[in-house]
């Protein structure tokens, strides 16, 4: 079976951050993306341009991570998350969960503006014994973000968030 590579490419220019998602956006690459973008927001990078031309789909954790970043941009004031080159699948995923309804999110069919050189995003390595806990934290945060933006998401993800909260309590109690 030929597995498509998963990669996130990033670049910067002034207040702009450029991201190209190659392959699938899913829970395993959500933590790195969130960490990178939160650092950029702290550095006053307020315009994020996400190119999905090579994206094959996104899971709810990745979508919730994008929602969380958009909410942080809104809180920061003048932020904008532009999502470009959507396939029918990725557009449906964004609209179904309400990410497109966030004030600072713009979905565009236009090709991206000329971007600086992009390079693979460097992720901080999580120790193996913390990996399960880190994954549960990322998934919980992402799904809570989705629940904030749409009542239908609350019904959809209520059970999952309860399971994740319980799992995190067990990690804290050393019952992994």
Image: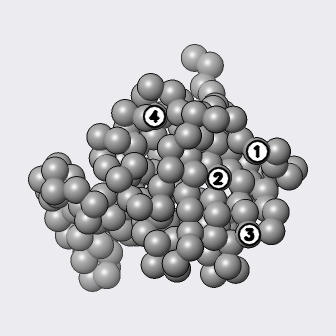
Mark 1 or 2 closer to N-term? 2
The residue that mark 3 highlights is: 15
Q: Nearer the viewer, mark 1 or mark 2?
A: 1
Q: Which mark is residue 90?
A: 4
Dots 1 and 2: beta carbons under 8 Å? yes
Left or right relative to 175: residue 128: right
Q: Quadrant of the N terminus?
A: top right
Q: Nearer the viewer, mark 2 or mark 4?
A: 2
Q: Taking 40 as reference, is 147 above or below it?
A: above
- Pick the residue in front: 153 or 49: 49
Dots 3 and 4: beta carbons under 8 Å? no
Q: Quadrant of the C terminus?
A: bottom left
The Cα atoms of the two marked residues, 1 and 2, are separated by 9 Å
Question: In this view of the protein, can residue 39 be seen by the observer?
Answer: no
Dots 2 and 3: beta carbons under 8 Å? no
Mark 3 or 4 closer to N-term? 3
The residue that mark 2 highlights is: 49
The Cα atoms of the two marked residues, 1 and 4, are separated by 20 Å
The residue that mark 1 highlights is: 113
Residue at the image position 56 percent from the left and 73 percent from the top: 78
SS class, disc 2: strand
Residue at the image position 37 percent from the left and 33 percent from the top: 92
Tag 2: Cα neighbours inside 10 Å, few (<14), some, or many (≥20)?
A: many
Residue at the image position 25 percent from the left and 77 percent from the top: 169
Mark 2 or 4 closer to N-term? 2
Toward the top, the furthest residue is: 1
Quadrant in the rendering for residue 13: bottom right
Tag 3: Cα neighbours inside 10 Å, few (<14), some, or many (≥20)?
A: some
Q: Taking 36 as reference, is 154 above or below it?
A: above
- Pick the residue in front: 138 or 36: 36
């Amino acid at each position: 079976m030929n597995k498509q590579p998963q990669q996130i490419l990033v670049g910067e220019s002034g207040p702009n951050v450029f991201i190209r998602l190659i392959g699938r956006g899913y829970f395993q690459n959500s933590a790195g993306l969130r960490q990178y973008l939160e650092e950029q927001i702290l550095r006053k990078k307020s315009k994020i341009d996400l190119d999905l031309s090579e994206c094959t789909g996104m899971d709810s954790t990745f979508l919730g991570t994008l929602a969380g970043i958009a909410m942080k941009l809104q809180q920061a004031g003048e932020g904008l998350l532009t999502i470009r080159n959507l396939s029918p699948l990725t557009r449906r995923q964004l609209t179904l969960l309400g990410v497109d309804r966030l004030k600072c999110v713009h979905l565009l069919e236009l090709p991206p503006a000329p971007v600086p050189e992009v390079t693979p995003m460097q992720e901080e390595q999580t120790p193996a014994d913390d990996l399960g806990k880190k994954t549960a934290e990322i998934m919980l945060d992402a799904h809570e973000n989705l629940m904030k933006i749409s009542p239908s998401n609350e019904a959809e993800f209520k059970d999952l968030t309860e399971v994740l909260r319980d799992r995190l309590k067990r990690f804290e109690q050393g019952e992994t």
